[in-house]
Image (cartoon, rainbow, N blue to C red):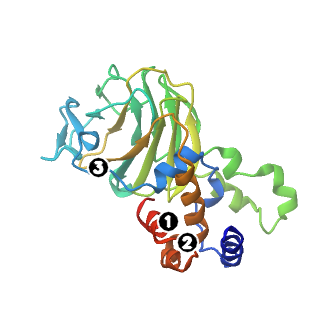
Amino acid sequence: MGLIVSVWFNARTTRKPPSPSAFFLLAVPTSSRLALALAASPASPVDRESRWSSHCCSPHLVLSPCKREVTRTPTEMSSDGVRAEVGVKSGLHLWELLWSPGHRGSHAVIGVSALDCPLQASGYSVLVGGDSQSWGWELVSNQLWHSGKMLEHYPGKEKRNPSKNADSLGPELFSSSNRKESEAPLLIPERILLVLDADAGTLGFVVDENFLGVAFKDLPRGVELFPAVSSVRGGARIQLRYLNGSTCEPPPLMALCGLSIRRVLGKQEQTHVEKLPLPPYLQHHLLHSY
């Protein structure tokens, strides 16, 4: 039966994949833990992990009744931040943040922080990433910030501007206009996934279902870290939702096999699971587990 399934998979993979996102070429391979977390069903949005903290919040930020959304009041010359209500010390965890590009302004930052990160400051500045206890990605400029310093662009310029291959691409594919476009900041869409691996001490992000790689490494182990955002734009609204997470234990073999099969089938072809020469129990597992 394994041979039959293998032949069937090979036949399905000959189909042309759908048009990729603009971030497709910037994506990096995911670990099995992250792949399973991305494929798993999200946790309930009413859990505490999906709430902003009413205690760790700038006075210029107003929380919705459910605490899943925060709105910045129209205040001049102020930078304002908020942390999630629940942090983590271990495991790999995913959060979804929704922040409209039209309501970001300058200094629109998402990332993680410890308890000591400041959440309000005079003037316009980066709060998340502005001290040694926070790490932030400024969405408008695509800059990474930590300890009050801009470290680099994310995703890295080496991916966005492949100068090493410029000669092989030819002048028609790597003109000066194309080079300027590749160096310009990328427009980050509304939905962003924050990926914190507290065991490995890394922070990364997923955009358009593409993992853009590790943005920060060497985060402190055993220290409680919280998703955090900071903004300077009046009317900015940011939503938070905890999706899921996993421990440092190796993923179950059955889950890994199911993930591999679903990758081959594709998101638009789940109905083909019923055509696989598999027992009903395994078909049900493929359809409903991940």
The answer to which quarter of the image holds residue 287 is: bottom left
* Residue 18: image tag: none
Residue 107 seen in the figure: no
Q: Looking at the picture, tell me which residue is in the foreground, 93 or 228.
A: 93
Q: Which residue is mark 3?
A: 239
Dot 1 crowding, Cα within 10 Å, few <14, some 14–19, many 20+: some
- Relative side of 60 to 225, left or right: left
Residue lying at 40% horizontally and 40% vertically, measured from the top left: 110
Q: Which residue is mark 1?
A: 282
Residue at position x 82%, y 54% from top? 165
Dot 3: element: strand
The disc, 3 or 1, on the residue closer to the chain's N-terminal end is 3
Answer yes or no: is residue 155 visible: yes
Residue for point 56% across, 50% down: 211
Gap in angstroms between the C-alphas marked 3 and 1: 36 Å
Residue type, mark 2 in image: Leu
Quadrant showing the N terminus: bottom right
Q: Which residue is mark 2?
A: 278
* 206 or 173, nearer to the observer: 206
Q: Position of residue 202 (x, y in %)?
A: 53, 33
- Identify the element where label 1 is drawn: helix
| Residue 55 rendering spot, x and y as whole percentages | 18, 28
